[in-house]
Amino acid sequence: MDNEQTVRRVVRVLRGGVALCLSQQGRRNGEALIRFDCKEHRDLALRKHKHHIGQRYIEVYRASGQDFLDVAGGQCIITLMSNHLYG
């Protein structure tokens, strides 16, 4: 089962609401931005910070809609995260 299917089993995600992040080499880096079906599912996901989904350890952070569009459009997640941490 791939990462996107695992996420979809846990919470309801909007159709087209998973943006898998890529490394600078163009490979999946294990990070993703998710758009949830409703606020309750978003809040449930945020409560899973530093927990496990199956065997996979996860960290969950809040991101903006613009962050999602940037990643879905091909921008690097590292740039986005440093903007949140420092800007």
Image: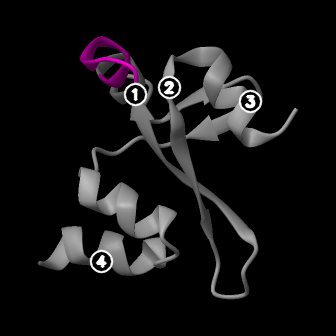
The amino acid on which the numbered mark 4 sits, given as a three-letter code, is: Ser
Within the magenta stretch, is there residue 20?
A: no
The secondary structure that most of the magenta stretch takes on is helix
Q: Which mark is residue 13?
A: 2
Measured in 3D between alpha carbons, the distance from the residue under mark 3 to the one under mark 4, in whole angstroms, is 28 Å
SS state under label 1: strand
The residue that appears at 33% across and 73% down in the rendered structure is 80
What residue would you read off at disc 3?
5
The residue that appears at 26% across and 51% down in the rendered structure is 65
Asked whether the beta carbons under mark 4 and mark 1 sit within 8 Å of each other, the answer is: no
- Front of the two marks 4 and 2: 2
The residue that appears at 41% across and 25% down in the rendered structure is 45
What residue would you read off at disc 1?
36
Asked whether the beta carbons under mark 3 and mark 1 sit within 8 Å of each other, the answer is: no
- Which portion, as a residue range, is magenta? 37-42
User: Which badge, 2 or 3, comes first in the chain's sequence?
Assistant: 3
Asked whether the beta carbons under mark 2 and mark 3 sit within 8 Å of each other, the answer is: no
The amino acid on which the numbered mark 3 sits, given as a three-letter code, is: Gln
- Classify residue 59 as left or right of residue 47: right
User: Which badge, 2 or 1, comes first in the chain's sequence?
Assistant: 2
